[in-house]
Amino acid sequence: MKRRIISLLVVSSLIFVFIVFYKGLNKPSFYKPKSEISKIPQFFAKNFYSDEEIDSKKIFDEDKYYLFNIWASWCVPCKDEHLILSKLSKNQQLDIIGLNYKDKVTNAKKFLDELGDPYVKILLDQDGTISIEWGAIGVPETFLIYQNRIIKKFIGPLNENSIIEIQQIIK
Amino acid sequence: MFYSFIGYYALVLGLIASFPIFFFSIKNLKNNAILDIKIISFSFIQLLLVFISFLGLVASFVFSDFSNETVFNNSHSTKPLFYKISGTWGNHEGSLLLWLLVLTLFIFIFLVKTKNLLKNYRILTTLFQQIIIFGFFIFLINSSNPFNHINPAPIEGLGLNPILQDPALAIHPPILYLGYVGSSIIFSSVLAAASLSYISKTWATHIKSWILISWIFLTLGILLGSIWAYYELGWGGFWFWDPVENVSLMPWLALTTLLHCILVLEKRSILGSWVIILSISTFTLSMCGTFLVRSGILNSVHTFASDPERGLFILSFLFILILISLVVFFVFHKKHNQELVSFSLFSKETSILINNWLMMYFLSVILIGTIYPIFLDVISSKQISVGPPFYHKLIIPFLVPFLLFMAIGPQLRWIKSGLDGKGFLAFFLIMSFIISYLIVKNFGADLLVNTILIGSALYLFLITVRDFLKKRLKNFSQNLSHFGFSLLILSILLNNIFSSEIITNLKVGESFKNEKFEIQFNELKKFQDKNFISFKGYFLIKENSASEKLEPELRVYNQPNIVTSEADIKTTFLTDKFITMNTVQNEEYFNIRYQVKPFMLWIWISVLLISLGGIISLLKRKNL
């Protein structure tokens, strides 16, 4: 009897392990960049309009919420996202900082002329290294920052729901 | 083209040879008192066919036949011949073919070497082994055929990953596989013996050789992998608790425990159930390792291909084997009264049992650390990464009793041991802790922890040295392995305490200075080699009055286009000087990492001594 219970237990736990492994097989498993950074990384970047070098420490230093948005003119979803950013830019408690990712400056300027400029400041990331520092996976990607800490990270374009989410946090 | 053709058909014929083996084995099981010679003949034919198939693949690699998909994916015509050959098993398909080759080789040797044993035991072992072989054949032909044809044939191959182009790594997989596959014989044989109630002293004596062989190869295989990681991955460590390292360590732990159990079984006819369960787990863990690495369910430097279909096959196959073994264990294995034989608390058996449980504990820690992330991901979609601190915190404290029992155990008698003449045990214990205290105190490292750890390792060290002097050649092999283990722990501990490291950015002509060293970056030269361009840095390290030249390298391989960093290591008896350089983005600066690592050489030597103990023990046996 005891033997039977033991064998039953062993077999059922084996089946459980099998199912977990089977499910694990179908999950994508690849190393992602560090996505769990909570402090913002330090970096130097060129200003989009003036070519001067800016220290990252001097960008997010006010007692305000910041939205750090990685974008590019060649990125199609960024166009839809731009409307959302324009809406968000009306909020006085929020400064939106752009990071222009692997882009041609002329194209980026044209993009902003057409769709408007919601950014307080735009930085350049021409070789993409700054975005890697931030642990970004692709474009667009957005970080909500308060007191030098990343509060929330949005992978992919922002949408109406993200506006509600952001406004709830800021409130 | 021609060689792939031969290889493929030899493989298919090899599969077909399985059927007569199954047929004659089952037929022979019931009648006849002697083993049917046809089983041995067909096993030999199968071995020959797999060998031809393997040679076909080697030839395809040597002659750079890019119409073969495996060769195309993993080779390149400018690769040196040595790496063309080792490229054969440096990939998923080829390594499985090698598995199969060793599987068929081992069962043939088994059949030839066991003439004096029970007929049905030999046949059943062949049957179980043939099930494994059959599974591997299907897997190879069905989902990882090494002889897939590309038409039209490409002109050039994609090349072998440069970090795999290394002499240590060229022989690391075959050695490790001999260990893994050796455990398959133990597995089949234990299933056969359990279902025939043949677990006995005779059986233990015979299977001990196979356990020793697998254990030796597994130890050496792990050692080679570790040496490779040390100088090629350029981090200066030798063990990273990477999932793939863990899956080779787990069967090793199971096998080491098994080795100790079989000794007890041979001498005292007890621990039969331990032996069965450990034999099954050793092989299961080896297979599990293959599954985890080959399916891409875990990711690490070793992952060749991630292909869920292949993973599913290995997974199902693995679980079928586990189910078969469970059925054998629960249904056929009858417990004898032998388990009732008692022994006193103060005996050899007790200390072996305690250390067996400790090894099982280490095994579970590593098992949980390796597969728990998968479970968590599947069940709750959360991800955690389990790193060295987890293993260190859970394993290191338990090394202390482990080392102490390793020292005391061999001094005790079987069944019951008195206290007379055991005074030296206490004396050595006190002495080693005093010495350890003096060493640690002078260097201001974490006092309590290190004193206890070094003290217990030193205890084992001194006791084994005493044994060498007192008992001379009696139990020499066991003593040598234990001595090697104490040396290993001592070297790792001292290496940890006394290592120092400098990381700095330098450009040519600059130098770095602190109170201990001065690092001068004198020159950078460019060389063209057969399949890579090398940038060599010339460094001068000044330490006190001595100075040392070191020349690390950056290699830019042409096919595939990968940059590797080759460390330059100056090894002496006492310490290793280790330097690597890496590029810094868009600058003429290089990131220089200089490490002084004491007793590195002794880590390798001690592992060699551990396996040498096994080799001596194997050679002392009159027959396999």
Image (spheres, rainbow, N blue to C red):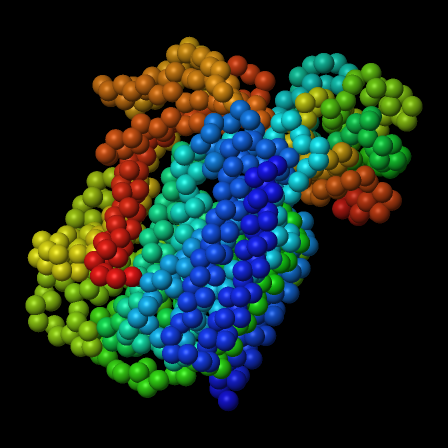
Q: Which residue is drawn at 74% across and 26% down?
A: A101
Quadrant of the image containing the C terminus of chain B: bottom left
Is residue A124 positioned above or below B523 on the image?
A: below
Q: Which of B64 and B288 is in front in this view?
A: B64
Quadrant of the image containing the N terminus of chain B: top right
Can I make out residue B189 in this image? yes
User: Number of marks in the image?
Assistant: 0
Q: Residue at x 17, y 60 (%)?
A: B475
Q: Which of B501 and A58 is in front in this view?
A: B501
Can I make out residue B298 in this image? no
Q: Which residue is drawn at 41% across and 79% down?
A: B32
Q: In which quarter of the image is residue B499?
A: top left
Position in image of residue B588 (x %, y %)? 52, 14
Is residue B134 positioned above or below B29 on the image?
A: above
Q: Nearer the viewer, residue B533 or B70?
A: B70
Is residue B250 positioned above or below B122 on the image?
A: above
Position in image of residue B495 (x %, y %)? 31, 40
Q: Residue furthest right?
A: A114
Position in image of residue B162 (x %, y %)? 51, 31
Is residue B77 positioned above or below B401 on the image?
A: above
Q: Please state if A78 lies on the left or on the right of A7 as rendered.
A: right
Position in image of residue B360 (x %, y %)? 39, 64
Q: Please state if A157 lies on the left or on the right of A20 as rendered.
A: right
Q: Please state if B321 lies on the left or on the right of B580 as rendered.
A: right
Q: Residue at x 48, y 48 (%)?
A: B51
